[in-house]
Amino acid sequence: SIPAVPGASRPPARGPAIEPSAAPATPKPSPISDTVIFTAPPDREARLESRSPVLANVQPNQATKLAGVDNVLTRLTRSLDQVEARQLAMLSSAEETLESKLRRMRGVITDLGLDMGQLEAAAPKGAMGGPFVPVKLGAESGPFERQLYRINITRAQVEKMNRTLSLVPYRKPVIGEVEFTSGFGVRSDPFLGRPAMHTGLDFRAATGDPVRVTANGKVVNAGWSGGYGRMVEVDHGNGLSTRYGHLSEINVKIGQQVKIGDIIGEVGSTGRSTGPHLHYETRIDGEAVDPQKFLRAGVRLSAG
């Protein structure tokens, strides 16, 4: 036996022999594998998902695109409808104005007892020409085209009537306010004091004031004519004529063509006159008619 050494540890008790290859008491780790399982943290997982392409959202929604186009077309159609409505309203106003003017023109000629056919035949025609191409409205014509067609027809009729009325003496022979010193009809003769027929209107005016022709025509008399003194007579065609008496000066010659507003002479007091004024007559087929009838027609025509 081996003697005990003081302070030395006691040798372990002998037990069965341990095999070198025997497994230790703690569990063995899992064997190493070629497959690696990686688990991403939740926030990382979310970031990865957000980067994943979503094919459903790449292509725009076709229905949404069509709806947008429909909205644009609807707004455009509404805008065009509003423009067309305004245009139709303007055309309606223009059409009513032209029709009203045409009615007044025809009414004036009727009231004056003039023959429309004769006046239209004698009316001057402008220099124009070209092949005849009739205007037709297609079956597909809309309200705008039909209304514009009517307006053009009415405008042509108004222009023709204007040419016709250029031969009717309804304008004033002197400028300024109309003031009569003597009217048409029976009156007391200023020289004899007896009733006598006054065949015209006496316009108050000063010596030298311009006298203007009241319609287109041709001068058929220009000179001294008895009680008229210096007098100008203009033939307007279709039996219509005007006379301008007591002139101090005459500015036209027989055979001269004159147009509305041309100055044919100056106011005076020649002939059978008591003072400066214009004696003005309108005649139909040689017979004197009241000039006020024509002047009222002029007021009516200028009303609109």
Image (spheres, grey):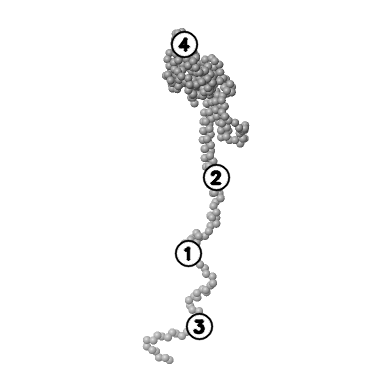
Q: Residues within 10 Å of mark 2 (few under 14, many from 20)?
A: few
**Residue position marked by numbered label 2 in the rendering:** 70
| Image quadrant containing the N terminus | bottom left
| Residue linked to disc 1 | 41
* Coordinates of residue 53 in the picture (x, y in percent): 53, 59
Q: Amino acid at mark 1?
A: Pro
Q: Tell me which label, 3 or 1, sits earlier in the chain.
A: 3
Can I make out residue 285 in this image? yes
Q: Which residue is mark 3?
A: 20
User: Under tag 1, what secondary structure?
Assistant: loop
**Label 4 SS:** strand
How far is the residue under mark 1 from the one under mark 2?
48 Å
C-alpha distance separating marks 3 and 4 = 169 Å
Give the residue type at disc 2.
Asp
The residue at which mark 4 appears reads as: 187
Q: Nearer the viewer, residue 248 or 201?
A: 248
Badge 1: residue crowd in 10 Å (few <14, some 14–19, many ≥20)? few
Q: Residues within 10 Å of mark 4 (few under 14, many from 20)?
A: some
The percent position of residue 13, horizontal first and vertical second, equals 44, 85
